[in-house]
């Protein structure tokens, strides 16, 4: 039985369809990514699955429980790390965890044991008595991950776990997620708009755009679908008519002076392409990445739509205000 | 619903509020200094030419100032839920497997604890002022001290609920500030905190007697100064009804609250 089963899940906010008839299944023990640009509906989907937002229509089960009818059971089965900071800065790391244990009805003994364990897992044992105010963005995320795990959930939701973090902290987080699935044997749902993150972490991913799933499979299979090599050129006046006539060019995408081609055997055909297209400023050839997969399915690059108001920026703005 | 888990949940929410309260020293200091200044400067200034039915004016307004301090800090306690919503802390609490009722009650107990601790300090200050003749005629006994805390328990429970009802509906702290000011100032000025209510002009009397805070001030005057308009039971009865009504509304508001 799938650990999460979503059927025609839809959420509308006064006329705006944030999530549009979503259908998907997540298997037990899987790391599943929802990959999509800003406003794609990733957070809204998680909010519905975690019972915080009521769906407009459609249903879903999480851990076998209906997200509308059995909210209590769903909540006991899940842990979540929210997109925005959700720990109390005026409490210490330890106190935030203690509060969590109490909210989840853990016995004091189990709670203390578990706090120790999860603090070790995210390497925050030494900083546990510092106020969260004094943590870095990465440490705070780690604390929130530890907290999400503390009550032994069967399913862990991570909403943009590395948004706004530096590369080193991001790798840290990836390491924990991988460890976790091995050690705690749980299923993980991650939302992200970082291709490399999805590629690194997930067993399967769904590309989600405008509330709809554009494609769903393992990263390797999705890249295979794009097929061939990708040739990206910067050029002001491309001769696209000429390119279209070349039979080894499988797909053409042109936008804002960037032409991107999917080509069989690029190393052999590159001279002919360059001859045909006209004057180019730069050229780059690579194997398909998830970026290309995204472009293939949505007709736009995810980089164009990259993060606004990331987790860390929001935190800074919030602190400045407070 | 598991009763034990719900009770521990209430305790959890209280634990957090109380920790935060103890760490925000400026909040505690501010909540003590302001009423003392009212007593000394406003009370002292007006008191030099006014006394009310034989009671020194500073002593006369002591119950009113006590009420004022509870009124302000209880209602403003609601702003913290707006801050919780600004980050995702509110979601962390709401996604836990306990009912919204318990979360609401935990917050009420948390806010009430803050306000009662402040009241306790103010009552001790009032007692000292009386003992050392700084405010002549203010004699706070142990019995009046305990009864005053009982009265204020109803008052703060009700007013924290009011603050939380407003807070549960607001997106921004500024919005909260605006709405709660519209509530707090009429409640304060119409309560008779600063004037006697036995001889009001007929246009003012209905507003004053419709104001639940009036009965808190009256009850406190009863237990601290031994002079009041209504019986203690009557005052407490009205406060209790008010408290039950706003707790019911608050529980409902929390159930309907959006994350
Ligand atoms: N409470 C709300 N009220 C109205 N509209 C909302 C609300 N929450 C989300 N939306 C809208 O729903 C759409 C999807 O938002 P959502 O937050 O789910 O996107 P996302 O994929 O998580 O994006 P991001 O990468 O920015 O976090 C957006 O257009 C957003 O403006
Ligand atoms: Mg989001």
Image (cartoon, coloured by chain):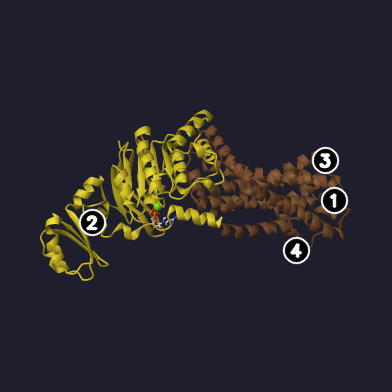
Share a chain, discs 2 and 4? no
Residue bearing the label numbered 3: B141
Share a chain, discs 4 and 3? yes
On the rendered structure, is B160 left or right of A212? Answer: right
Share a chain, discs 3 and 2? no
Residue A316 is situated, as x and y percent measured from the top left of the image, at: 49, 55
Other-residue count near label 2 (Cα within 10 Å), few / some / many at <14 / 14–19 / ≥20 = many
Q: Are marks 2 and 4 in contact (CB under 8 Å)?
A: no
Q: Nearer the viewer, mark 1 or mark 3?
A: 1
On the rendered structure, is B18 left or right of A15? Answer: right
Residue bearing the label numbered 1: B135
Query: Can you tell which quarter of the image residue A200 is in?
Result: top left
Q: Which mark is residue B220?
A: none
Q: Is residue B137 visible?
A: yes
Residue B132 is situated, as x and y percent measured from the top left of the image, at: 86, 46
The Cα–Cα distance between marks 2 and 1, rounded to whole angstroms, is 81 Å
Query: Which colour denotes chain B?
Result: brown
Other-residue count near label 1 (Cα within 10 Å), few / some / many at <14 / 14–19 / ≥20 = many
């Amino acid at each position: 039985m799938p650990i999460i089963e979503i059927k025609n899940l839809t959420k509308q906010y006064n006329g705006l369809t944030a999530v549009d008839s979503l259908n998907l299944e997540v298997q037990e023990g899987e790391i599943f990514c929802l990959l999509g640009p800003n406003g794609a509906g990733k957070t809204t989907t998680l909010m519905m699955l975690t019972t915080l937002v009521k769906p407009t229509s459609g249903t879903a089960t999480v851990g076998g429980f209906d997200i509308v009818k059995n909210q209590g059971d769903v909540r006991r089965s899940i842990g979540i790390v929210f997109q925005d900071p959700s720990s109390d800065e005026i409490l210490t790391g330890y106190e935030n965890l203690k509060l969590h244990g109490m909210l989840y009805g853990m016995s004091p003994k189990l709670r203390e044991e578990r706090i120790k364990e999860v603090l070790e897992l995210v390497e925050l044992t030494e900083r546990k008595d510092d106020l969260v105010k004094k943590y870095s963005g990465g440490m705070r995320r780690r604390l929130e991950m530890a907290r999400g795990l503390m009550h032994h959930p069967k399913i862990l939701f991570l909403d943009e776990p590395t948004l706004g973090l530096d590369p080193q902290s991001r790798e840290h987080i990836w390491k924990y997620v991988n460890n976790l699935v091995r050690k705690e044997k749980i299923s993980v749902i991650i939302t992200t708009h970082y291709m490399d993150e999805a590629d690194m972490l997930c067993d399967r991913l769904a590309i989600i755009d405008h509330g709809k799933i554009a494609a769903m499979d393992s990263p390797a299979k999705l890249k295979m679908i794009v097929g061939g090599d990708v040739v990206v050129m910067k050029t002001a006046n491309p001769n696209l008519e000429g390119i279209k006539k070349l039979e080894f060019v499988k797909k053409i995408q042109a936008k804002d002076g960037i032409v991107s081609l999917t080509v069989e055997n690029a190393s052999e055909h590159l001279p002919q392409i360059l001859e045909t297209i006209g004057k180019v400023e730069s050229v780059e050839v690579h194997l398909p990445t998830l970026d290309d997969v995204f472009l293939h399915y949505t007709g736009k690059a995810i980089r164009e739509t990259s993060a606004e108001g990331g987790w860390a920026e929001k935190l800074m703005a919030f602190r400045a205000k407070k | 619903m598991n009763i034990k888990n719900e009770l521990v949940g209430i305790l959890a929410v209280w634990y957090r509020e109380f920790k935060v309260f103890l760490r925000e020293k400026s909040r505690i200091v501010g909540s003590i200094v302001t009423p003392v200044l009212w007593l000394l400067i406003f009370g002292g200034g007006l008191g030099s030419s006014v006394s009310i039915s034989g009671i020194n004016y500073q002593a006369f307004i002591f119950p009113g100032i006590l009420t004022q301090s509870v009124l302000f800090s209880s209602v403003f306690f609601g702003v913290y839920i707006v801050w919780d919503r600004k980050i995702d802390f509110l979601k962390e609490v709401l996604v836990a497997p306990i009912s919204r009722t318990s979360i609401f009650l935990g917050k009420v107990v948390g806010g009430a604890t803050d306000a009662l601790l402040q009241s306790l300090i103010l009552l001790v200050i009032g007692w000292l002022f009386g003992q050392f003749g700084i405010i002549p005629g203010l004699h706070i006994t142990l019995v009046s001290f305990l009864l005053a805390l009982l009265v204020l328990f109803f008052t703060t429970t009700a007013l924290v609920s009011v603050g939380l009802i407003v807070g549960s509906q607001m997106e921004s702290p500024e919005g909260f500030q605006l709405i709660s000011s519209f509530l707090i100032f009429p409640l304060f000025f119409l309560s008779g905190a600063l004037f006697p209510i036995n001889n009001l002009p007929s246009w003012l009397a209905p507003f004053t007697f419709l104001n639940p805070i009036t009965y808190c001030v009256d009850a406190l005057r009863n237990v601290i100064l031994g002079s009041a308009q209504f019986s203690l039971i009557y005052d407490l009865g009205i406060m209790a009804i008010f408290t039950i009504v706003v707790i019911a509304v608050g529980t409902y508001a929390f159930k309907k609250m959006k994350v």
